[in-house]
Image (spheres, grey):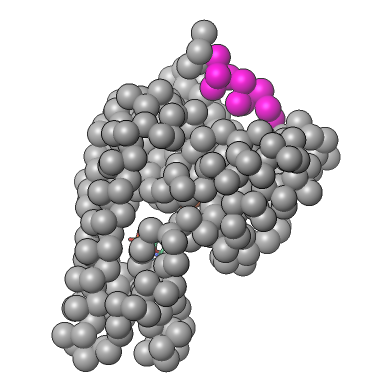
Amino acid sequence: MAEMGNGLTKQIDRLDNSRADLHLHTTYSDGALSPETLIQRAHSVGLSVVSITDHDNVGAIDEAIEAGKCLGVEVVSGVELSVALNEKDIHLLAYFFDYKNQKLQDYLAFFRYERLKRAERIVQKLNDINISLKMDAVLDQAGIGSVGRPHIASALLEEGLIETYHEAFMKYIGVGAPAYEKKYQLSPLEATQLVAQAGGLTFLAHPGKYTTDFELSTLIQAGLDGIEVVHPSHNEARQEFYRGVVHQYFLLECGGSDYHGGRKNDDQVLGVYTVPLQIVEDMRTRLFS
Ligand code: AMP
Ligand code: ZN
Ligand code: FE
Ligand code: FE
């Protein structure tokens, strides 16, 4: 528990309906819970503001708002966008945009279609090397969510074609493996512009997972409004570092649990990785005053 420094203890102490979680996933991407169940859980751990940030999908937001109304949980529009910086996959979080914005909806529909075609290419490549996976097995795993490599890995496992989930990436679908296929690539600048034209703010998600200082500065120049400071992958020193960058560049901060409803063995994060409501107010001030 080296990661659970004083900052986190303080956060747990302050679970008094004054906390927000701005990074959550549902069945509309790779989360295990429906929007309604997720909002109920969020409420039960004392969260009063949340944002559902499904990967490249805003389908959960209407249901989440509805569920939130009954329980007094405010739902801020959100999404986690996949972008590419020099071939590297980067995740951006966006908030407070109009989730019915036509340009945004069109892009997300296009991206999901591209993901589907890519999954078909991966399945074809697998078949070419005598791994007899069917596309239907992948679609069963994806359900209503955007199709990704995790669904292909789960399908391979389910069909008994591999022994462990990770084997899928190591042997077949990881970068450089025989059935790997790239995703459609949106640049960080295109993403920040897409969000801005829909009236929202864009943040770099969990930079501690993979972002070098050089990449961070390139992304800031691409028009980021802020950085995700609180995240399960950031220890207290990382949080302080990113908070420093936020202040230095007059950015905003965001944070949350990245809870996938237990799918990633992450049941302990909900209600623990949270931010004060002031963070949400700061976003509103930047946008609306
Ligand atoms: P996609 O967006 O379809 O390329 O899938 C990316 C997701 O696959 C990541 O967010 C991870 O959840 C998962 N993933 C990628 N590489 C690995 C790996 N080596 N082992 C396990 N999961 C991985
Ligand atoms: Zn995810
Ligand atoms: Fe992410
Ligand atoms: Fe996430």
Vertical order, 163 against 144 (above or below):
below
Comparing 166 with 79, the one in front is: 79
| Residue 268 visible in the displayed image | yes
Residue drawn at point x = 27 percent, y = 89 percent? 132
Residue drawn at point x = 22 percent, y = 52 percent? 184
Quarter of the image for the N terminus: give it: bottom right
Image quadrant where residue 160 sits:
bottom left
Comparing 272 with 38, the one in front is: 38
Image quadrant where residue 268 sits:
bottom right
**Magenta stretch mostly in which secondary structure?**
helix
Vertical order, 273 against 99 (above or below):
below
Q: Position of residue 211 (x, y in %)?
A: 39, 44
Task: Report the side of 31 relative to 18 (left or right).
Answer: left
Q: Position of residue 95 (x, y in %)?
A: 48, 32
The residue sitting at the left extreme is 128
Comparing 140 with 283, the one in front is: 140
Residue drawn at point x = 26 percent, y = 88 percent? 131
Vertical order, 249 against 64 (above or below):
above
Q: Is residue 284 magenta?
A: yes
Range of residues picked out in magenta:
274-285
Task: Report the side of 59 relative to 133 (left or right).
Answer: right
**Count of numbered tags:** 0
Residue drawn at point x = 64 percent, y = 52 percent? 36
Q: Position of residue 204 (x, y in %)?
A: 43, 37
Q: Position of residue 128 (x, y in %)?
A: 16, 85
Q: Is residue 87 magenta?
A: no
Image quadrant where residue 256 sits:
top right
| Residue 223 visible in the displayed image | no
Task: Report the side of 71 relative to 119 (left or right).
Answer: right
